[in-house]
Amino acid sequence: MPTEPRSIVAAVRSVSTPSPATSTPTSWREAVINAFVHRDYLLHSNVKVEVFDDRMEIISPGGIPDGLTLAEIKDGLTAARNPRLIHILDKMKYIENYGAGIQRIYRAYESFHKDPQFIVRENSFKVVLPNQNYVRITEQESIMRGEQNNRITELNKSKVLEVLKLSDRPLKRLEIQAKTGLTRDQVVAALKSLRREGSISVLGASVNTRYLAE
């Protein structure tokens, strides 16, 4: 085995702390430990861990050993490519219930709308773990942005309606823009909303369209 066991143990020990790239430390730990335990050490390549905003990717050199399929591994079947390493890590309590790692990763995502991905190639095994924290933050930001836009829309409507109420005659859109300081799109959106609510009346058409507060 080209890599010293102690360096592998050090790498595995480093995954005891949950990763900031996923809200499921179980999946992160299992995927990285599996990458070292089941990799092909005859291939001159390293285990690769990449962290993105929305996911983590762990790539291990070597495909699935002994002709097993991904479906069989998901069912708990095992093929020990590096039995001595497995024995060492098992004695050090880094491996629990050997053969159930992928099942534990799936269970960690049971309440999430995205599943982890396992991509098998001839000389590599790739695990993609969606970042649950990232998605939740994004959804929260979307809600906050929507609430902010609603407040701005209501404020624009109030400005337009106030200008129309203070006017002694119907006003054209350009006049409303000048009096409110709003953009064309903001005035158009406000007028459409006020019209749906029945707060204003529309007189004329085309370039002669004018608006009047009810």
Image: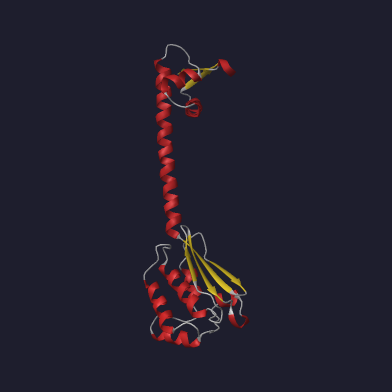
Q: Position of residue 93 (x, y in %)?
A: 38, 82
Question: What residue lies at 47% left-to-right and 58% top-to-bottom?
Answer: 54
Write down the quadrant of residue 63 in the picture: bottom right
Q: Residue at x 48, y 24 (%)?
A: 198
Give the colour scheme shown.
secondary structure
Query: Residue 99: percent from the left, percent from the top?
Result: 50, 80
- Is residue 168 or residue 180 the one in the foreground? 180
The quadrant of the rendering that contains the C terminus is top left
Residue 141 sits above or below residue 64 on the image: above
Q: Residue furthest left?
A: 17
Whether residue 155 can be seen here = yes
Question: Eyeballing the image, is 27 above or below 158?
Answer: below
Question: Residue 176: x, y in percent?
Answer: 46, 20
- The mark tally for this picture is 0
Left/right placement of residue 205 relative to residue 91 reads right
Q: Nearer the viewer, residue 58 or 76?
A: 58
Name the residue located 42 percent from the left edge and 28 percent from the top edge. 156
Viewer can see residue 95? no
Q: Quadrant of residue 124?
A: bottom right
Pick the residue in front: 206 or 83: 83
Q: Going 43% across and 72% down the picture, which residue do you hit?
A: 29
Q: Quadrant of residue 79?
A: bottom right
x%, y% of residue 149?
A: 43, 37
